[in-house]
Image (cartoon, coloured by chain):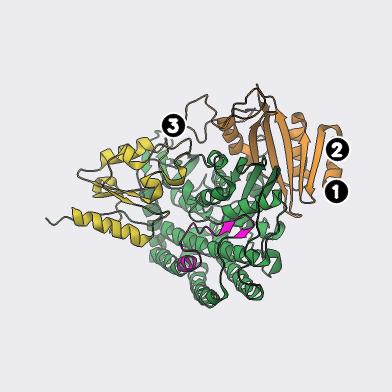
Chain colours: A green, B yellow, C orange
Amino acid sequence: MSKQTLIPVGPYHPLQEEPELFKLYCEGEIVKDVKWETGYNHRGIEKLSEKKSYDEVFFLVERICGICSTSHPFAFANSLEEIGNIEITMRAKYIRSIIGELERIHSHLLWVGLAGHFLGYNTVFMWAWKYREPVLDLFEMISGNRNSYAMFQIGGVRRDIENAKIPAIQKVLALVKKKTDLLVGAVMDDPVIHARTKGVGILTREDILNFAAVGPTARASGVDIDVRRDDPYAAYPLVNWKVICAQAGDVFAKAEVRLLEMYESISIIEQCLEGLKKEKEGEINVKVRHIPEGYGTGRAEAPRGEVFHFVVSDGSNSPARHKIKAPSYSNIATFKKSCIGQSISDATISLAAVDPCYCCTERLAVALDRNSGKRIMNAKEIIEHSAMLTRKLLQHE
Amino acid sequence: MLLVGSVRHADVLLVNGSINKKDKPRLLEIYQQAPKPVLVVAIGACGCTGGIFAEGNTFAGPVDKIIPVDAYIPGCPPKPEAILAGVVKLLGKN
Amino acid sequence: MMVTDELKKTFGEKILDTVRKTDRRISLLIDPGALIPMAGHLVNEMGFRFIIASALHTKRGFEIFYHFSSDQTGLILNLLVILDKDKPEIESLTNMFEATNWIEREMHELFGINFLNHPNLDQLLSEGNWAKGVYPYRKTFKSNGEAEA
């Protein structure tokens, strides 16, 4: 029997008709209102955390999000080490920052690919995801896994990055730097991309402050905040790097910030690798026997912005309360400002520009007629609609 | 392996992630919409058993409590090679 | 510390206790009635950013930590309020800024805390996940004050 077998495999969002996460209420082509429905991925993690020992919680929190998997253990470790006044070794600081920055690189590459997909630039999508692979391979070499690296533990890190591995890492960084040059050239100078992203999805400085948005979303609107510099942790105060900002607040500015940040990440990692060579191999954690009573706030700059953990300890081996804030929680709400008044195609790229975390956007968007409530377009159709607009612009080139 | 936009064109349903109470009716709906016969693959620790989230207060899975499952691919997350190998093995049997 | 000095000058007796863990981690226990003016002062006059709010249910009642960041200095300033264990309610901050909208809804859903005058206290996470009127993050306390497992 010859049977054609069709199996859905990636891109990242398998597009389905139901349920809708973002409901775009439209009059004709224009988005008049946006409603965000959530709860599909609510797993009760904060409550689960209370049932687990501190060591186990690290494995729990790194599974909050597949893309910014490291930022949660990073912030959690910072909060515990604050409660216990624990100082980690220099080697551990370098390793933590290396992992954090490698994650930023692969996350931004993923975003560039997705943005390309939403615009109908599938070559950009393929490129970005292809050059993500060497980074994921690096993670596998360092930690044994492509995501959820289990590198963090209280008092340091669980695995060393042996000096023998450093040349392999440097080789991948050189490759990524070259490919980023290509991507930057392709994206930043392309007139069609300019047409699709400049002036689109604008968030003003006032919007950012009103929503208390964070990360590249904030920096693209001229709000100069970055936890790595403002409240330094791990190896960030030990190396030279700069915070990337833009002023326009549109989709283009957000892309620009993410692309240029990748160069800074590469530089941070290179400097940390040099730092590693000076520290004794194997000194990667300090013994922690007990977390005293008290509370601690820990934060980290994830690819999407500030991750914040608040832990209340009652002196036992489990958190008494563990509050987690992901950056997307602060950033997604900005859709109220960035999407309303835009065309449907522009609304999709505006939503994507905030880089909402996968956990929040399994099923992206649907367009509904404002008056009748009837569905005009499903998620796939919205993306196709957006791609069509790009093709039209390309024809006029 | 091709992506399909609608479950009505699918021969295989890959279900990953843990299923919470809000997801459950959607999963059932999708399964009902799929033309039979359809093969269901539970992917990852979450799909197979609920994994680390099984004790959560919104957990409604694992997948095989909601719809029949033909193959399980464990891992957290399973590597791409594991997913491909599992699907190939399943198709080989059918 | 300059920040706490300025706050003490303006809000004096509304600050019930100060805990300074380090120069960058300070918590103030405040009168719930002072939340709105203090939050407004921090954000509008002193350039702080609202990070998030953490609610917890303890034998003291319902406690909410409002976390604020001074990005220029790296300071995290927590404003702590303790609300009545039988009727936990406090004025919503959302009429002042958007940033608190969702977290107040979430705290309402999980703990049953009422945020007075919130523009839309609709469910955020729970529809279908648990029943109305059930507040899954509430704890029950034994007569000696200990939380039940």
Judge the density around disc 2: few (<14), some (14-19), many (≥20) Cα neighbours within 10 Å: few
Q: In terms of sequence position, does the residue under pointer 2 or pointer 3 come before the other?
A: 2
Q: Which residues are magenta?
A: A135-157
Pinpoint residue A99: horizontal percent, then vertical percent.
Answer: 56, 63
User: What amino acid does circle 2 point to?
Assistant: Thr
Q: Chain of mark 2?
A: C
Regarding mark 2 in the picture, which secondary structure is present there? helix
Pinpoint residue C46: horizontal percent, then vertical percent.
Answer: 78, 46
Regarding mark 3 in the picture, which secondary structure is present there? loop
Read off the residue under disc 3.
Answer: C128
- Residue at 30%, 55% in the rendered image: B3
Dot in front, 1 or 2? 1
Label 1, label 2: how far apart the Cα atoms are: 13 Å
Dot in front, 2 or 3? 3
Regarding mark 1 in the picture, which secondary structure is present there? helix
For the residues beneath circles 1 and 2, the answer to whether they share a chain is yes
For the residues beneath circles 1 and 3, the answer to whether they share a chain is yes
Question: In which quarter of the view is residue A282 placed?
Answer: bottom right
Read off the residue under disc 2.
Answer: C10
Q: In terms of sequence position, does the residue under pointer 1 or pointer 2 come before the other?
A: 1
Q: Based on the picture, tell me whether residue A141 belongs to the magenta stretch.
A: yes
